[in-house]
C-alpha cells in the first residue's frame, strides 16, 4: 500500500492568513493526488484533483502543486468557512489511501 | 445533479453481516466511466477506502478487508451494495458511498454518510 503522510496534523491560523499543508507519498504517484475538505458531520468535498486542477465551483484561493512524492495544498487568504480538516488522497493505485488529515483551526 | 444516498441498518450485532446500499440518482451506473466506491471513517478518525465496483461488476477491494467483503451492483435499480461479514466493534464507523470518474480519479460525489454501530 502507498502510505500518505500529511503535515502538520493541525494548525492554528487567522482569517486572511496563507496556509500551506504538505503531503508526502511513500513512493512516486506521479500527479495522482487529490485534496479534500471535510467539515464536522459532513462528507468530504474534493478541492483539487490531479495535484493542481481546481474542482469546478471551488474558490480560486485554493491551489495545489507537486508531483512524484511531495505535494502541497495552499489556501490564500483564509476565510471563516475554510476552518475544517483537509485530507490528501492518492489515486495512483489500489488500495486508494488517504493522509491522516490536517485540522485547520481558528487562532 | 448526481446524488448518492446510503441506506441500511444503523446497528449490527457482532459476528453478523453489515449490509448497506447506495442509491444513485441523476446519473446511470450502467453508462460506465466511473468507479463506485465505499469509504468509511471511524469516529474521530481519518478516511479508509473499502473498495469499488465498475458497472460491469469488476471489483477492487482493500486487502485489509478483502476476506470479509463483497461489493455488488444492481444496474436495474441504479444501486450498489456493501456486505461486510463477521463484524466487530472495530467496524463501527460512518460509511460513505462515492463516485470516482475513471478519467480524473477523484471522489467527486459522495453520499451523506451513514453511521453503523456494531454492538450487542
Image (cartoon, coloured by chain):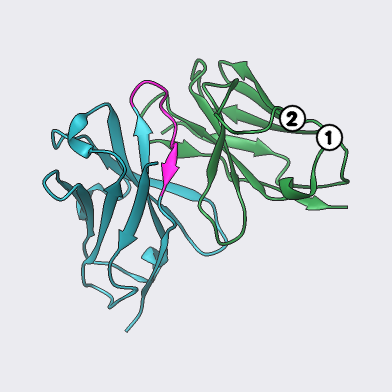
Image: A74 above or below B3: above
Task: Give the percent coordinates (x, y) of residue A57.
Answer: 59, 33
View extreme (left): residue? B76
N-term-proximal mark, 1 vs 2: 2
| Drawing shade for chain B | cyan
Q: Residue A61 — which label?
A: 2
Q: Is residue B107 magenta-colored?
A: yes
Q: Is residue A20 magenta-colored?
A: no
Between the C-alphas of marks 1 and 2, the distance is 7 Å
Task: Give the percent coordinates (x, y) of residue B14.
Answer: 28, 75
Q: Is residue B59 visible?
A: no
* Neighbour tally class for label 2: few under 14, some 14-19, many 20 plus, Cα within 10 Å: few
Give the extent of the magenta segment: B102-110
Q: For residue B83, what is the image quadrant?
A: bottom left
- The residue tagged 1 is A77
| Drawing shade for chain A | green
Image: A70 above or below A4: above
Q: Main secondary structure of the magenta part?
A: loop
Q: Is residue B91 visible?
A: yes
Q: Chain of mark 1?
A: A
Q: Nearer the viewer, residue A61 or B67?
A: A61
Circles 1 and 2: CB distance less than 8 Å?
A: yes
View extreme (bottom): residue? B120
Task: Give the percent coordinates (x, y) of residue B38.
Answer: 34, 48
* Neighbour tally class for label 1: few under 14, some 14-19, many 20 plus, Cα within 10 Å: some
Quick one: SS at disc 2?
A: loop
Residue at screen point 40% across, 35% down: A96
Q: Nearer the viewer, residue B34 or A26?
A: B34
Image: B116 above or below A21: below
Amino acid at each position: 500500500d502507498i502510505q500518505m503522510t500529511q503535515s502538520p496534523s493541525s494548525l492554528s491560523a487567522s482569517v486572511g492568513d496563507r496556509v500551506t499543508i504538505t503531503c508526502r507519498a511513500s513512493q512516486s504517484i506521479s500527479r495522482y493526488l487529490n485534496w479534500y475538505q471535510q467539515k464536522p458531520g459532513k462528507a468530504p468535498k474534493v478541492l483539487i484533483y490531479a495535484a493542481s486542477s481546481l474542482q469546478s465551483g471551488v474558490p480560486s484561493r485554493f491551489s495545489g502543486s507537486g508531483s512524484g512524492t511531495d505535494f502541497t495544498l495552499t489556501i490564500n487568504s483564509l476565510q471563516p468557512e475554510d476552518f475544517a480538516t483537509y485530507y490528501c488522497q492518492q489515486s495512483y493505485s489500489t488500495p486508494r489511501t488517504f493522509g491522516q488529515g490536517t485540522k485547520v483551526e481558528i487562532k | 445533479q448526481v446524488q448518492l444516498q446510503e441506506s441500511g441498518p444503523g446497528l449490527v450485532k457482532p459476528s453478523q453481516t453489515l449490509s448497506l446500499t447506495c442509491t444513485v440518482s441523476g446519473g446511470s451506473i450502467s453508462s460506465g466511466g466511473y468507479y463506485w466506491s465505499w469509504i468509511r471513517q471511524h469516529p474521530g478518525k481519518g478516511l479508509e477506502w473499502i473498495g469499488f465496483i465498475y458497472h460491469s461488476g469488476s471489483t477492487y477491494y482493500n486487502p485489509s478487508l478483502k476476506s470479509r467483503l463483497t461489493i455488488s451492483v444492481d444496474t436495474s435499480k441504479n444501486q450498489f451494495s456493501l456486505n461486510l461479514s463477521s463484524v466487530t466493534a472495530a467496524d463501527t464507523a460512518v460509511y460513505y458511498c462515492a463516485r470516482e470518474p475513471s478519467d480524473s480519479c477523484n471522489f467527486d460525489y459522495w453520499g451523506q454518510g451513514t453511521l453503523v454501530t456494531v454492538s450487542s
